[in-house]
């Protein structure tokens, strides 16, 4: 195929194998903060005829020496540009040869945190997706894999790389990784670190040493991560039959980190907020997240590392599958229904938002300018949903057989989505040609369901008429129908289930399904377990919703009925109509149902967020008014609290967890209901309960909840000061301190508060967590970010421009605060547009931010 004529972008259609086989990689690092030397020896062999050898290498990698089979090549045969080093075919031997390079790099000047950099005096690396090219010249692409031998020379006491230890002396350590891997899985750490250690014996008897490396003083906050690691290793053996494959497994906690964590082979590197936890500093949500990310990175050892991606277009092959696996793990460790509901909430908040706006793209994109911009909710979370649907369609056994075949057939490969689907076809005999559209087509399908009851048939006939339609997305107007698994169950008029869950497979634009012999007309419980990532439109009245909230046997559908009740009320209230009585009644009844899991009740009590309401309004073609939405939500919460004050205060008292703090699910569930009750009561008790709780609670979960309540009542200052006094030197707590003030502020004041906080000396904005705390806090304050005077937009744009010069990945990622801008009113659109134009016009704008901003601007054109 001819290369696509679009020079600034990469295209899936242009894939071509690397023309050389890489047999072996040897690396030798001499670490100095400002002048690190890297010597590399690559054993290569032409795949077919000899071509020019092109190695990737960023502009700040300085070439010191180059040899081919021990001799310097003729300089006229070597070409260096900003992104590559090319050695002409004429200078290369015919068979196997060794290219040796020596380069110098400056980790101390690396503010992008990509490649080799310093964090608090510690050397560390981040190579996914294309960071290795900032360390040395290399074929930096995931389908070029080799075993690695690494030598590290440094005065730092702890020197780590991938694989197994292969010798150590004063100031030097050697590592050998026998498993061929692409460069993006390389890692190196050198620092003054201490470890929390344990060990794990695999099912087949391999002893693995487990270490979690942290800064001295942090050891007592790493225990939970270690327990989570051991649970993850056990689970992957039990459920997927996957064993660990090295003698050591190291995890390192780093304070400056662009994302959550990274699955480097045998040496996972984590953002310290996803490792360190103590009851006084971390919330229940933090503990749960630590457990799931530890699992996620560990599970990548098979889904990502042993089987990797052919190219970055296939990113969902490893990320969608690994998210799906970590979701299954959390469901098994904690409450499966609660996990499912939380995952759907997150999917709607982040992925639906993305899929319905200017940044929509397929789970497997076909074009990108900067791959770092495609580590998205669509690739990760929708990628996981697609696998869930596949499992639903082929059944649990079919799924198990397919995964077995996948590991068997592709171990050691750099694979594609075609390979993945072929495995399912071969293992189950099912044709997945139509299913593949879930990978290739962007956009969230809208599903409508209408029902009809026919008495004239004996026993009665229920007919469900399903239709699907996917709105256009950038670059794709025409959306052929997809296969959509719709899980349906039927509830009889007395509240008993009369038909168990059955999967209807919708394959056409419109299709009908009959149910006969039911006797009496049932109530339909549909999209059970959120069986497909679609927007369901269904003509249903509040009475039926309340019935489902009371009786549905599927926990997701039951929660969804409550959410629908809330949303329909909020949508009406935001448009100045009266509504909400049905919701208040039904939720009150549920709150007092002591047979229901407290965590489930807490989820039902949580009103949809401002952002959810805006999204729903936009879907109904109503321009969302952020202030009206905020007022509607406030008003409904207050009415809910007033109507059920007694029951809520009873819950607040009885859900207190006695004894020492435990992060496990049952205790966290009680706290979550307690906090939900507190949040509602706070609207009528002026913050008195919150003040007491803040002063007495021994755990961060309740203190943080109390702090939010106090801020909402305009009396948070004393608590904020107390928290600062107590934890001023704890970065992770201070991140919360920054974000909560902006997130929970009255919207009209939020941009000014953000501005004031940004002026503080301890606003260490180059630290990604701190930057995200403040800017993410504002973005999470919907009416604050969208303040009518544009101050939220301007504040955000100013800081994105400043960040772009220092760390483009973070700037580009945070620019998604603007991704819904086209749906607001003309005045807001104009201000948002001006802010985006200002960013786009910035001299020297990074490729990352340029791509994001131009996609967002194009949508409003
Ligand atoms: N592969 C990592 C994960 O999901 C995420 C990742 C991609 C990443 N690029 C990164 C992490 C850059 C840190 C920095 O598991
Ligand atoms: Zn991942």
Image (cartoon, grey):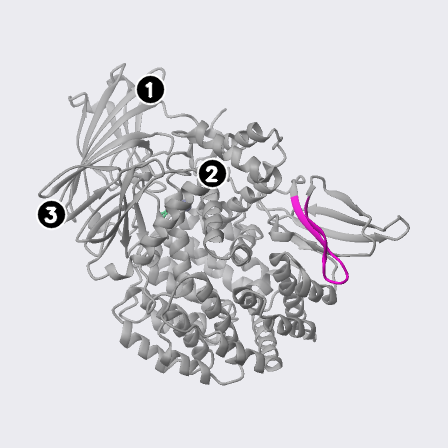
Residue 632: x and y in percent read 61, 74
Q: Is residue 474 magenta?
A: no
Q: Residues within 10 Å of mark 1 (few under 14, many from 20)?
A: some
Q: Report how far apart the C-alphas of labels 1 and 3 lie in the structure.
A: 41 Å
Q: Which residue is mark 3?
A: 155
Residue appearing at x 28%, y 36% in the figure: 57
Please give the name of the residue rendered at 51% of the width and 39% of the height, measured from the top-left corner. 364
Q: Nearer the viewer, residue 267 or 382?
A: 267
Q: Residue at x 35, y 15 (%)?
A: 49
Q: Is residue 444 left or right of residue 33?
A: right
Label 2 near ligand 2 (CB < 8 Å): no
CB contact under 8 Å: marks 2 and 3:
no
Q: How many marks?
A: 3
Q: Earlier in the sequence, mark 1 or mark 3?
A: 1
* Residue assigned mark 1: 51
Q: Find residue 120 and report its image quarter.
A: bottom left
Q: Which mark is residue 474?
A: none
In this view, 206 is above or below 279: above
Dot 1 or dot 2, earlier in sequence: 1
Calculate the distance from the C-alpha at mark 2 to the C-alpha at mark 3.
40 Å
Q: Position of residue 530 (x, y in %)?
A: 61, 52
SS type, badge 1: loop
- Which residue does the image show at 69% across and 67% down from the upper left? 546
Q: Nearer the viewer, residue 210 or 286?
A: 210
**Residue 159 located left or right of residue 7:** left
Q: Which residues are magenta?
A: 485-503
- Quickly name the residue at label 2: 317
For marks 2 and 3, the one nearer the N-term is 3
């Amino acid at each position: 195929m001819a290369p696509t004529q679009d020079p600034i972008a990469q295209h899936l259609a242009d894939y071509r194998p690397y023309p050389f086989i890489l047999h072996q990689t040897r690396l030798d690092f001499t670490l100095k903060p400002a002048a690190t030397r890297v010597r590399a020896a690559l054993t290569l062999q032409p795949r077919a005829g000899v071509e020019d050898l092109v190695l990737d290498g960023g502009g700040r990698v300085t070439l010191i020496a180059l040899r081919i089979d021990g001799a310097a090549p003729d300089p006229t045969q070597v070409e260096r540009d900003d992104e590559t080093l090319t050695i002409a075919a004429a200078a290369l031997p015919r068979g196997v040869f060794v290219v040796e390079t020596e380069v110098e790099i400056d980790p101390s000047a690396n503010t992008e945190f990509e490649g080799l950099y310093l964090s608090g005096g510690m050397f560390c690396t981040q190579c996914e997706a294309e960071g290795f090219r900032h360390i040395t010249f290399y074929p930096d692409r995931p389908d070029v894999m080799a075993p690695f031998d690494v030598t590290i020379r440094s005065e730092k006491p702890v020197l780590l790389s991938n694989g197994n230890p292969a010798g150590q002396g004063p100031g030097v350590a050697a590592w050998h990784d026998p498993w061929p891997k692409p460069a993006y899985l390389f890692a190196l750490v050198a620092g003054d670190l201490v470890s929390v250690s344990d060990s794990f014996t695999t099912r087949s008897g391999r002893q693995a040493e487990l270490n979690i490396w942290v800064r001295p003083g942090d050891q007592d906050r790493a225990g939970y991560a270690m327990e989570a690691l051991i649970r993850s290793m056990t689970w992957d053996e039990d459920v997927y039959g996957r064993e660990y494959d090295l003698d050591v497994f190291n995890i390192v906690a780093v304070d400056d980190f662009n994302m959550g964590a990274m699955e480097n082979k045998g040496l996972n590197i984590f953002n310290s907020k996803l490792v360190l936890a103590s009851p006084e500093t971390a919330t229940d949500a933090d503990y749960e997240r630590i457990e799931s990310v530890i699992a996620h990175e560990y599970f990548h050892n098979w889904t990502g590392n042993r089987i990797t991606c052919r190219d970055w277009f296939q990113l969902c092959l490893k990320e969608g599958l690994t998210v799906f696996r970590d979701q299954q793990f959390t469901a098994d460790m904690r409450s499966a229904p609660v996990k499912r509901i939380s995952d759907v909430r997150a999917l709607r908040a982040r992925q639906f938002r993305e899929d319905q706006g200017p940044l929509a793209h397929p789970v497997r994109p076909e074009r990108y300018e900067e791959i770092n911009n495609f580590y998205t909710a669509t690739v990760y979370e929708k990628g996981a949903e697609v696998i869930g649907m596949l499992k639903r369609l082929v059944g649990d056994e079919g799924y198990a057989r397919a995964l077995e075949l996948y590991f068997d057939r592709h171990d050691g490969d750099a694979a594609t989505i075609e390979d993945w689907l072929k495995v399912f076809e071969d293992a189950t005999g099912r044709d997945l040609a139509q299913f593949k559209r879930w990978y290739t087509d962007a956009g969230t399908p809208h599903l409508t369901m209408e029902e009809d009851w026919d008495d004239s048939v004996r026993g009665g006939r229920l007919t469900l008429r399903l239709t699907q339609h996917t709105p256009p997305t950038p670059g794709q107007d025409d959306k052929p129908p997809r296969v959509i698994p719709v899980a349906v169950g039927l509830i009889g008029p007395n509240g008993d289930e009369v038909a168990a869950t059955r999967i209807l497979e919708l394959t056409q634009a419109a299709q009908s399904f009959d149910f006969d012999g039911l006797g009496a007309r049932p109530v339909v419980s549909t999209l059970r377990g959120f069986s497909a990532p679609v927007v369901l439109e269904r003509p249903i009245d509040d009475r039926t919703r309340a019935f489902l909230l009371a009786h549905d046997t599927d926990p997701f559908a039951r929660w969804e009925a409550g959410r629908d009740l809330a949303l329909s009320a909020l949508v009406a209230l935001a448009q100045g109509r009266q509504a909400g009585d049905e919701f208040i009644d039904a939720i009150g009844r549920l709150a007092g149902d002591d047979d229901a899991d407290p965590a489930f009740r807490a989820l039902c009590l949580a009103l949809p967020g401002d952002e959810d309401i805006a999204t729903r309004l936009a879907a109904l073609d109503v321009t969302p008014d952020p202030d009206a939405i905020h007022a509607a939500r406030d008003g409904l919460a207050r009415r809910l609290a007033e109507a059920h004050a007694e029951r809520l205060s009873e819950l607040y008292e009885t859900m207190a967890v006695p004894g020492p703090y435990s992060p496990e699910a049952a205790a966290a569930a009680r706290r979550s209901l307690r906090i939900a009750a507190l949040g509602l009561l706070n609207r009528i008790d002026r913050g008195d309960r919150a003040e007491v709780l803040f002063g007495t609670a021994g755990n961060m979960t309740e203190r943080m909840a109390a702090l939010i309540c106090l801020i909402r009542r305009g009396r948070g200052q004393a608590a904020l000061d107390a928290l600062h006094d107590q934890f001023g030197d704890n970065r992770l707590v201070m991140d919360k301190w920054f974000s909560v003030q902006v997130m929970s502020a009255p919207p009209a004041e939020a941009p000014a508060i953000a501005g004031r906080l940004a002026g503080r000396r301890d606003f260490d904005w180059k630290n990604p967590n701190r930057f995200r705390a403040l800017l993410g806090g504002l973005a999470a304050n919907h009416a604050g970010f969208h303040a009518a005077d544009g101050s939220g937009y301007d504040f955000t744009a100013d800081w994105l421009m400043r960040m772009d010069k220092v760390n483009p990945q973070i700037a580009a990622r945070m620019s998604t605060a603007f991704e819904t801008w086209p749906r607001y009113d003309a005045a807001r659109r104009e201000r948002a547009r001006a802010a985006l134009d200002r960013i786009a016009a910035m001299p020297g704008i990074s490729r990352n931010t340029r791509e994001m901003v131009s996609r967002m601007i194009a949508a409003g054109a």
